[in-house]
Image (tube, rainbow, N blue to C red):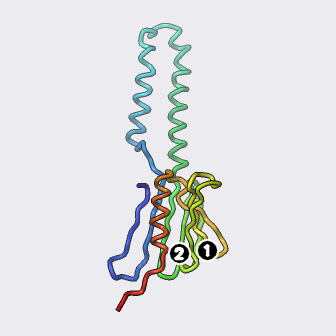
Amino acid sequence: MPYEWSTPPRGADADISLSLWPHRSLPRRGFAAFVLGTFTLITIPLYPLLGTVVLWGLLPFILAAVGGIWWALEHSYRSARVTEELVISPDEVHLTRTNPRGDVQEWDCNRYWARVQMHPKGGPVEHYITLKGSDREVEIGAFLSEDERKALYGELSDALRPPSPMAG
């Protein structure tokens, strides 16, 4: 899953944090291999044309196609530089979102008033998750897949539930 909880040691009254990031199915090493492989395969039909004028007519289009693939993949990597950090302390909930261009958005709320809501329809994505409190509603995990958002909703609901007093 492209998110990870860090929980405090048992019995400690410490913060719980959640880190979220978009899933990357193609790592950087795979990116380079894919572009190189595409270039190699796309030039195979050009080998019989070596030494002819036709090669020079086709070469710019081949290079433009490979350049377009590189640009599209690189753009995908840049747009996925978003991270979200949720910290749930005994008294407060704080969400920090770092956008692809580096600007930071923050939201905080008293833990007692913080509520997690799932919107099965009507949001920008199916099963849209929001946190509500302090007269503001913010999204969380919109870049996750639908199944990941469903799982996250249950985990967030459990994490935001007030701690039960220990029976003595």
Outermost residue to the top: 52
Between the residue at mark 2 and the residue at mark 1, the CA separation in whole angstroms equals: 9 Å
Residue visible at 58% across and 68% down in the picture: 131
Image coords of residue 4 (percent x, y): 41, 62
Q: Quadrant of the N terminus?
A: bottom left
Type of amino acid under label 2: Val
Residue visible at 43% across and 76% down in the picture: 15
Q: Which mark is residue 93?
A: 2
Q: Is residue 100 above or below residue 28?
A: below
**Residue 32 or residue 164, whichever sits in front:** 164
Quadrant of residue 51 in the image? top left
**Residue 47 or residue 3, whichever sits in front:** 3
Q: Is residue 71 above or below residue 151?
A: above
Image coords of residue 115 (percent x, y): 56, 72
Q: Residues within 10 Å of mark 1 (few under 14, many from 20)?
A: some
- Which numbered disc flags the more N-terminal residue, 2 or 1? 2
Q: To which residue does mark 1 refer?
A: 133
**Residue 132 or residue 104, whichever sits in front:** 132
Count of numbered labels shown in the rendering: 2
Residue visible at 48% across and 79% down in the picture: 162
Residue visible at 55% across and 31% down in the picture: 68
Q: Quadrant of the C terminus?
A: bottom left
Q: Which mark is residue 164?
A: none
Q: Are marks 2 and 1 in contact (CB under 8 Å)?
A: yes
Type of amino acid under label 1: Gly
Image coords of residue 42 (percent x, y): 45, 21
Image coords of residue 47 (percent x, y): 42, 13
For discs 2 and 1, the disc positioned in front in the rendered view: 1
